[in-house]
Amino acid sequence: MADINTEVLIIGGGVAGSAAACALSKKGYEVLLLEKSEKPQDTARGDHLQPAVCEILGNWDVLDRFFKSGAKKRAGSLWFDEDANFLMDANVSNLNIPEPYFMFMNHEDISGVFVSAAEENQNFSFMCPIVSCAHIETNDEESVFEIKSKDGAIKTVATKMIMIADGVASNMGRYFKFERTSFRYERALAVLFSDEYKADDFNNLRTYLTDRGIVTMIPRAKGGCKIGLTINRDEIKSWKKMSPEEYQDFIGQLVPTYKNLKMYSAGIYPPSMIIAENWSKENIVLIGDACHGLHPGRSQGMNTTIKCVDHLLGLLPPKESFEKKSVAKSLEQYQKEMKSNINELLEANHSMGLSMDSFDRKSKVDEIEKFKLLEQNKEAGHNYRMKSAGYGVF
């Protein structure tokens, strides 16, 4: 007899795991969420959610909680050449969609909002920090794990369904022999912070096309901005040694309008694409980066994950018939549907990553013409804005 019986065990308390815990517990399922680390998540990582995802969060009755917790609205993005000549306004506020804005919040705060919403449900439990989670057995009725807490306490947990959300490394995914393919991109994503940056009234991203790629100024929810650009992998060592003044000079040479903006390093991320061959196996399902680690250049990871969780939510058996066998059938159906639905997005993300690797002066000229045409062509511009809002992709 297990110490704890639950319907869903979620391994990993990042954005993917906490979002799933929130959605499932609100629907009445018994959920146990496990997380090893008490440390805040990396503040330099993705911080915006698409309008389509805001619509989902509204359906989950958690959207208002984000705004009460400090999230802000963004109209969209503005595109310029390196000399700050205007190219396109990709504003989504005039689209005929339920939530015509992007929502943004510092990455380290997002999971906490999901967890606090889940904690309103008596059927939700959260164990953090844990030292280990070991699979003991899976029989016809359930899967059993042994959980060791930081204080040394050991408990056994029996569950009908297992959600693996332990990130790109996914030790648990490897344990259960999920095969994954990976692709390593050539250029790394470098992130800088500026506390002095002032956003416009609509909190727009401002993206500049330069000879060595895009430079994006991303307003942060607590003020200032995040600056994103790519650097070659052989530049990483020297980049880490640069002073704030050297970062400022580097960005100022690419986009002169920011030559006087003070900034400092936030992190470097050598990106890889990791895609699981299978997303589910019996009563186990992979979600988030454990399933599909995307190139971070467009911040599609969180958005894709929440869409996947929402789709899965509609396929799971109702609570009264929530058994291991019925769960396995639902997960098989989820894999069939979502792998097909998401394929276009994965291919587009990979193509974008490759283009960022090879971006040069010719790429810049081509992109400048593309965005000029998008600004001038009403239908093409509308389609671009809808896709950026998260609609029409899958």
Image (cartoon, rainbow, N blue to C red):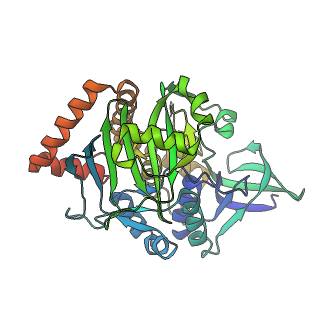
Most foreground residue, 290 or 230 = 230
Q: Residue at x 58, y 48 (%)?
A: 325
User: How far from the left and from the top, in percent, is residue 323?
Assistant: 60, 55
Q: Residue at x 18, y 48 (%)?
A: 383
For residue 337, which quarter of the picture? Answer: top left
User: How far from the left and from the top, in percent, is residue 126?
Assistant: 70, 64
For residue 6, which quarter of the picture? Answer: bottom right
Tell me, yes or no, if residue 315 can be seen here: no
Q: Residue at x 13, y 41 (%)?
A: 373
274 to the left or right of 10: left
Q: Quadrant of the N terminus?
A: bottom right
Tell me, yes or no, if residue 86 can be seen here: yes
Numbered-mark total: 0
Q: Is residue 334 above or below residue 66?
A: above
For residue 219, which quarter of the picture? Answer: bottom left
127 to the left or right of 89: right
User: How far from the left and from the top, in percent, is residue 180?
Assistant: 55, 29
User: How far from the left and from the top, in percent, is residue 310?
Assistant: 43, 57
Most foreground residue, 355 or 122 = 355
Q: Residue at x 50, y 66 (%)?
A: 222
Q: Is residue 384 above or below residue 153?
A: above
Q: Is residue 333 above or below residue 16?
A: above
Q: Is residue 120 above or below residue 360?
A: below
Most foreground residue, 345 or 192 = 192
